[in-house]
Image (cartoon, rainbow, N blue to C red):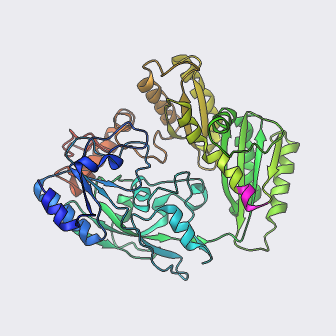
Amino acid sequence: MPEGQLAAILGPKGWIRTDDSAPWSRDWLERHGEPPLGVACPTSTDDVAQVMAACFRAQVPVVPQGGNTGLCGASVAGKAGAVILNLSRMAGIGVPDLAGGSVMVEAGLVLARLHDALEGTGQMFPLHLGAEGSAQIGGLIGTNAGGSQAFRYGMMAELVLGLEVVLPDGTIWNGLRGVQKDNAGYQLRKLFCGAEGTLGVVTRAVLRLHPAPRQRVTALLALPSFDAAVTFGTAARAEAGEFLQAMEFFSDPGVDLALRHVTGLVWPLESRAPVYLLVELGAGSDCVPLDAILAALLEQGMERGLVLDGTLAASGAQRAALWRLREDQPEGQRLEGPQLKHDISVPPARIAEFVARGAELCEAAVPGVRINPFGHLGDGNIHYNLTPPPGQAGFGGQDGDLALALAALASEMGGSFAAEHGLGRSKIALADALRPAAERGLHRRIKAAFDPAGLMNPGVILAEVDKYNLPIA
């Protein structure tokens, strides 16, 4: 076993023994994770390459880990004895290329630190999500994260121009090319976006930047139904066009959970409604009349009965308070007790249909179950989270049946049961059941090409028993 080699490579601060590894060993939901052989904390790409080579020679599995904020168990070990490769000590930021709109960063950089570093440069990195205070760039690449502005700027794969990756045997692939157009063969960088650490370890990335908005307008709206939200969202796309930066929806049960459990939240509207929509417009020029565009949109919405009430953020502090009402809902639900999380996407026009049909499925399986749907109206991503009925400790053993029923419904509607959280360990069975055999066969062939020994994050995306060499169909 390579403990001694890894300790020699990384030094006393870079190798954490099994006995001290508890903070890195379990996932955020406390559902996955076995004691590792130890935790490797490199400070350079060369360190990573040496660690990977040593583990490859000893045939020891490696689990790449970023901020460990994932919800599908991909960043912790599925079996005891693996090496967790935590990249938090590799958190460097390069000088932004303002002419080309890019910046080079190390994989352990926390997303919020990148946002802070770009302040005052006139550029921004447009990925925003609730866990940005702890989520790391490498993990965001590994899960192909989306966030609240994905419908305008794309998911992580669209925001990565180049990558540096250490392969399972310690070979370093340097694809750090900061250009948008690079068609010299297969798009290798995109294979690692969403691979969840099963093909190699991302160590550095060239990220695509966008002009920072010089003005924003943000509104929280109360609506009578999810149908109204979908109709309003269609009108918002037509009226606000390229200035529309976010359309986040949530429901009244989610507001209840957040207000009950999360301190510092303030409800800004005079009344409550079934559905709420957080709308934000932004522009890189002060000449764009964003206030007038939003006012016209709200006036149309009220005339059509789509908007019941609303408030505009008059300051940055008020804007942040409105966003907290949306972003703190997962924490409110976690503090309420047991929960089931489902990361669904459907075509945006069918969001209301999914919410209604999903509610029927859930109520039939667990009468009285509390449903908290929230997410991104612009791209159809629904975080369809469940809490047991009041006074009930769980879901009556229906957890797996609920997940399968909702996943099948999303697939039937032309959507996905893994919108932005990935498959990890928890959704492999859903993928095997609901995705075509040809698709799963291609996954195995890609895995076999990069990692024939199955040492990279085994048990993630594909079951560990797979030999990765099955026929395509």
Left or right: 113 as drawn, with respect to 265: left
Q: Is 332 situated above or below 279?
A: above
Instruction: Write the residue at 31% across / 42% down.
Output: 440
Q: Main secondary structure of the magenta part?
A: helix
Relative image position of residue 12 (x, y in whole percent): 23, 64
Relative image position of residue 286 (x, y in whole percent): 77, 74
Nearest the viewer among 274 and 11 is: 11
Q: Is residue 318 magenta?
A: yes
Nearest the viewer among 26 and 438 is: 26
Left or right: 155 as drawn, with respect to 49: right
Relative image position of residue 2 (x, y in whole percent): 13, 57
Q: Is residue 170 visible?
A: no
Instruction: Write the residue at 55% across / 83% down.
Output: 99
On-image quarter of the C terminus? top left
Q: Is 395 situated above or below 26?
A: above
Q: Is residue 107 visible?
A: yes
Nearest the viewer among 211 and 314 is: 314
Q: Is residue 119 magenta?
A: no
Left or right: 127 as drawn, with respect to 212: left
Instruction: Using the rendered view, name the quadrant where residue 154 is placed.
Output: bottom right
Relative image position of residue 408 (x, y in whole percent): 46, 31
Q: Is 293 situated above or below 178?
A: above
Left or right: 382 as drawn, with respect to 432: right
Nearest the viewer among 240 and 290 is: 290
Which residues are drawn in magenta?
Answer: 315-319
Instruction: Write the residue at 72% across / 37% down.
Output: 275
Count of numbered badges drawn on the protein? 0
Q: Is 157 situated above or below 355?
A: below
